[in-house]
Image (cartoon, coloured by chain):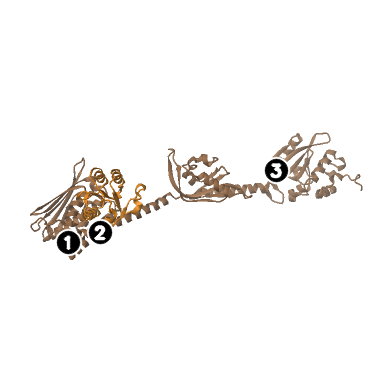
Amino acid sequence: MTERAPRVLVVEDELFVAMMIEDYLRDLGFEVVGPALRLERGLALARDEMLDFAVLDVNLADKPSFPIADALRDRGVPFIFATGYGSLGLNDAYQGTRTLQKPFDLQDLAEAIGDRARSA
Amino acid sequence: MSQQDDIFAFLAGGGGVETLMRRMDWSQTPLGPVIGWGQSLRTSISIVLRSPTPIVMMWGPDAILIYNDAYARFAGGRHPDILGLPARDAWPEIADHNQNMIDICLAGRALSLRDQLMMLNRNGVAEEVYLDLFYSPVPDDHGVPAGALVIVVETTDRVLAERRRIDEMQRMHRMFDQAPGFVAILGGPDHIFEFTNPAYRELIGGRDVIGQRLADAIPEVVAQGFVARMNAAFQSGEPHVGIGTAVSLRRDGSGGEETRSLDFIYQPIRDEGDQITHILVMGMDVTERVRAQEHQRFLLNELNHRVKNSLATVQSVVRHTLRQSSSLKEASESISARILALSRAQDVLTGQSWAETTVETVLRSAVEPMGAQRFHLNGPEVALGRRQALALSLAVHELATNAVKYGALANDDGTVRISWGVEGNNAPRFRLTWLERGGPPVCPPTRRGFGMDVIERGLGAELDADVAMSYAPEGFALELDARLDAVKIG
C-alpha cells in the first residue's frame, strides 16, 4: 500500500451534487479527479487518468454514463453509481452494481465505497 | 253403381277435387264429355290427383286447368272457380307467361324455373309470390304433346327469409362501416376474409383482402402469433381478447412495418347448428392512448429524478453553507436565501417547460429580490439550457448578495451593469460581463466562500466557461467567456 491518497473520479451532472460528493470524498481522505459534468469529459478522464475508484451519475444531461462504466470496467477500476432514478435506470450489464440513491450522505458514500477503493 | 260403370273411376283418391270433378258438366268445357277423354288424359289426371305435391295440368290448345288438392290450397280463393277454366281466364295476371310455357310444352320441351317471381291475386289482393316451376309435356294417345304438367313449389317464405337475411347482413355491414372501431369477418378454418370495414382497411394499410386467407392477406401477423390465436378461437369457441396488444403491420407500400397497439376481440360465430363458421374481429386502435400512458410514466420518472436531484442540491447547499458560516444566524439566512434562489430558478424553468429559457429571464428573476432598479441589463436573446440556467441563477444570486454586502449595492448610489452578447460566427462564444460601479472602495475578499465556489466552479463547469474576476478599487468586475453551444445544451 502506498502513502498517496486514492484517486477517485467523480462524474455527476448536477453541479451542487458534484461539489458535495467532492467535499465528502476529500473528507474521507480521497483525491478527487474531476468532477466531470458531461459524458465526453468523464470518458476522457476515465481513460487517461490514474484512478483507484469512481462515482458515476447514471444520467448525464440525458445521456447514460454507461460508456464511462465500460471504460472503467475495461481498466479494472471499481465504481459505484449515484442516481435519482433508482436501479430502474440501470441497464442489464450493470444491474448488480452498487447504487446510491440521491440524496445520500457521507455515511452512505463511505459505506458504499467500503474497502473497494482502499484496496487499490 | 259398379266400378266398371263409373266413368269417373280414374279420379279415385282425388280428395276434394275428385268430388268437384264428378259434379262438373264437362260437356260445357272444351274438353267435352268425360266419356270422350283419351286414355292418356285420364292416366295423367289420375297421377295428378293422387300427388301430395301441388300439380296442375294444362290440357289442349285452350290449356284447361285440372289440378289436385295441394294445388287447390296454393290457389287460395281462386279455387274452385278455376277448375276446368282455360289458363288465360284462370290466371289472367300471368296469361302471357302461361301461354309461353304451354307453347314450349306443346313443342315437346320441358322447362324448370327457380324462384320465379309472380304477382298473383289469390285472395283478393295482388301479392308477390316466388315459385319453383317444373314444366313437362304430356302426350296424347297418339304420342303427340297435348298438354303441360306443371309442378308448383312455392318458395316465397324461403326467398323472403333469404332476402331478410341479406338485408340484415347489409344493414350490419352498413353499421360496421360507420363504426369507429375496426371490424372484419373471416369465414372457415382457413380464416378467409368476407368483410372488412373502412377502419380495418385503414389499419392494414388499405390492402384488399376479401376472399383471401388471413395468412396470405396479412402475412406479417403469422410470426406474431395472430393466426394461431384465431385458430384457437375457431377450434375452442372461446373468444380471444387482447388489451393494448402490440402488432406490427405493413401500412404503406414500402414494406416497412409500423407497430400499433390494439384492444381487440376474436369472437367465434356459430350457425343454427351450433357449428363455428366465422370469426368476428372487432377492436380499437389504442396506440395514442398507450403512448400517452408511456409518456406519463416517463414524466413521473423524470419528475422523481428531478425532485431527488433538487433535494440533493439543497443538501449540498446546506452543507457548504454550514461549513463556511461563522454563526448559526448567518448560516440560517444564507441557506434560506440560497434555497429561495434555487426555487426562483426552478420557477423560471417551469414557466418554460423545464427545457430551455433565456439569459435575460434568468438574470431578471435572480436580481429581482435585490431591487431591480439598481441593475442595468443589456443583451440579446440567448437561449439557456436547464442546468446552465440553474448555475447562472445561483451564481448571479451569489454575486448580487456579495454586491449588497461588500460591493456596489452596499451604499445607495452604486449600480451593477450586466451586459452579454454572442461573438464570432465559427464556434461562436457567449460573453457576459458583470460590472459594479459607484459603490464603496473595493477590497479583495480574504477567504473563499461558497459563493465563489458557485461562481467559479458552477459557471466554469456548467457553462464550460473561463471566468475572470477583478477587484479594482472602483468596483468589482467579472467576465465570463463560454462556448455558445455549451450554454444551450440542457
Whether residue B38 can be seen here:
no
Q: Are marks 3 and 1 in contact (CB under 8 Å)?
A: no
What type is the residue that disc 1 sits on?
Answer: Ser
Which residue is disc 2 drawn over?
B315
**Quadrant position of residue A45:** top left
Which colour is chain B painted? Answer: brown
For discs 3 and 1, the disc positioned in front in the rendered view: 1
Report helix, strand or loop for mark 2. helix
Instruction: Note whether B353 is above or below B51 in the view shown.
Output: below
Q: Is residue B302 left or right of residue B83?
A: left
| Chain drawn in orange | A
Q: Is residue B42 left or right of residue B464?
A: right
Inter-mark Cα distance, 3 to 2 = 95 Å
Name the spot of residue B158 as percent of width and height, x first.
66, 47
Label number found at residue B325: 1
- Of label 2 and label 1, which has the lower sequence position? 2
Name the spot of residue B473 as percent of width and height, x first.
7, 54
* Chain of the residue where label 2 is placed in the rendered structure: B
Q: Residue furthest front?
A: A1
Whether residue B183 can be seen here:
yes
Name the spot of residue B207 as percent of width and height, x first.
49, 40
Which residue is disc 3 drawn over?
B132
